[in-house]
Image (tube, rainbow, N blue to C red):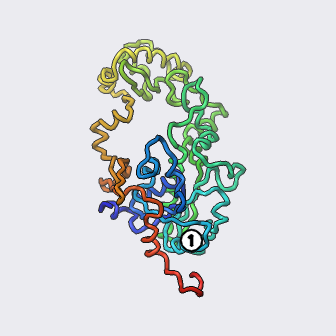
């Protein structure tokens, strides 16, 4: 582990990551990026189910690339939660931890006796983060808390694509990522509050709440606009509400994104005098017509040629890059957002790095995701009292 990660803002904080899949582990990853020690609590027989959640046919060291991406830098403590002895060991670990993150379905954690009320009897200073699919008490609480299903129930899919496309999901697990970031915010606030009160707190969110919050800008418009639904553009739609020219346009050799801009300013640059005749109101009401006009002109020049015209005029435009093009840019390389993490068994993974810089420095933890129970012995020796002699019972 590099020196910078040892000196992180959360150095000295111990996080128990009792979650699986994406949202909870992503939150624990971010706390680890900020310097916390993250101990992943998982089953000895297979571990986190995310180890087998493949995004492609690529695996590294027996685990999916997704697992490696979201669990780098963590330690693994393997226990059987159906075994009372193992549960006692976990409780001993909880007694010395600072943060717990769990994303069990509502009711499961209670049956294990590891709900917040029970845990506070072990450690009243614990900051306890819970992520569910739809909240702990409503009528959807027992539905599977899966990203695509949460997107479907949130209304957000109707914002994507063009007018005739129907609902279009995001191309990644956006609900999981958003919920993970929200629980990190709550945990950090809880740690600040604990420094004042010396008491822990339970912070909660869900995939659905994260997706609703993600839409606060457009949902607020809907709530205060007579309940009218947004009408997606049929041409190069990029935002369900914003007027022309907002969209992504095909050029002679690629794609260009064009953000909000007065049409009159664009008219001479595109050599389309008709653009100057549209009123600001018509930029909404005649959006498809305007965007079709722009699209017919954009394909006549290359992306580079258009940027040479638009950028000097302070037009908000950008080339649409795929990953290979992004990775080749000097700007991306200068960010230094990639790293290689390694493990004692020879596993090596090229992945992303901590997205947060502190005092100009991006700290990096170069340890790869753990094997199942790889640090169990070390953690037991450090946190868990030895078992008493036979006949005296467990502590």
Residue 192 appears in view: no
Residue 237 in the image: state x and y as whole percent.
Answer: 51, 26
Q: Where 334 sits versus 259, above or below?
A: below
| Residue ID for mark 1 | 86
Residue 238 in the image: state x and y as whole percent.
Answer: 49, 29
In screen coordinates, is 22 left or right of 319? right
Query: Residue placed at 59% from the left, 44% from the top?
Result: 212
Query: Residue placed at 57% from the left, 27% from the top?
Result: 232
Q: Which is more toward the observer, 172 or 89?
A: 89
Query: Residue placed at 49% from the left, 76% from the top?
Result: 384
Residue 90 in the image: state x and y as whole percent.
Answer: 54, 70
Query: Residue placed at 52% from the left, 56% from the top?
Result: 48
Q: Where 172 sits versus 36, above or below?
A: above
Residue 265 appears in view: yes
Q: Which is more toward the observer, 206 or 289?
A: 206
Residue 37 in the image: state x and y as whole percent.
Answer: 42, 64
Would you call the spot at circle 1 few (<14 residues within 10 Å), some (14-19), or many (20 or more)?
some
Query: Looking at the figure, which quarter contains the C terminus?
Result: bottom right
Callout 1: SS: helix
In screen coordinates, is 318 left or right of 190? left
Q: Which is more toward the observer, 64 or 207?
A: 64
Q: Where 278 sits versus 124, above or below?
A: above
Toward which corner of the image does residue 80 lie, by quadrant? bottom right
Q: Which is more toward the observer, 228 or 292?
A: 292
């Amino acid at each position: 582990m590099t020196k910078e990660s040892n000196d992180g803002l959360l150095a000295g904080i111990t996080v128990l990551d009792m979650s699986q899949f994406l949202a909870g582990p992503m939150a624990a990853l971010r706390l680890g990026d900020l310097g916390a020690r993250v101990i992943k609590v998982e089953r000895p027989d297979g571990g986190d189910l995310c180890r087998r959640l493949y995004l492609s046919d690529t695996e590294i060291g027996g685990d999916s690339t997704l697992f490696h991406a979201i669990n780098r830098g963590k330690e693994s403590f393997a226990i059987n939660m159906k075994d009372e002895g193992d549960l006692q060991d976990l409780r001993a670990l909880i007694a010395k931890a600072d943060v717990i993150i769990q994303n069990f379905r509502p009711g499961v954690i209670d049956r294990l006796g590891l709900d917040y009320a029970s845990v506070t009897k072990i450690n009243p200073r614990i900051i306890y983060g819970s992520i569910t699919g739809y909240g702990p008490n409503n009528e959807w609480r027992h539905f599977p808390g899966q990203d695509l299903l949460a997107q479907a129930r949130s209304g957000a899919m109707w914002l994507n694509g063009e007018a005739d496309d129907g609902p279009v999901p995001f191309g990644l697990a956006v609900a999981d990522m958003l919920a993970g970031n929200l629980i990190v915010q709550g945990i950090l606030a809880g740690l600040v509050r604990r420094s004042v009160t010396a008491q822990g707190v339970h912070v909660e969110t869900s995939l659905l709440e994260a997706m609703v919050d993600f839409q606060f800008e457009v949902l607020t418009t809907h709530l205060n606009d007579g309940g009218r639904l947004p009408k997606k553009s049929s041409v190069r739609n990029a935002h369900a509400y914003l007027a022309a020219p907002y969209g992504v346009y095909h050029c002679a050799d690629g794609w260009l994104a064009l953000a909000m801009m007065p049409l009159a300013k664009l008219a001479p640059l595109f050599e389309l005098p008709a653009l100057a005749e549209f009123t600001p109101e018509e930029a909404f009401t005649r959006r498809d017509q305007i965007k079709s006009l722009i699209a017919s002109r954009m394909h006549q020049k290359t992306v580079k040629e258009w940027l040479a015209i638009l950028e000097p005029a302070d037009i908000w435009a950008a080339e649409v890059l795929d990953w290979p093009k992004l990775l080749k840019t000097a700007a991306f390389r200068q960010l230094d957002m990639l790293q290689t993490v390694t493990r004692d068994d020879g596993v090596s993974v090229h992945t992303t790095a901590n997205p947060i810089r502190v005092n100009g420095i991006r700290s990096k933890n170069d340890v790869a995701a753990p094997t199942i129970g790889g640090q169990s012995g070390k953690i037991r020796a450090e946190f868990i009292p030895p078992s008493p002699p036979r006949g005296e019972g467990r502590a």
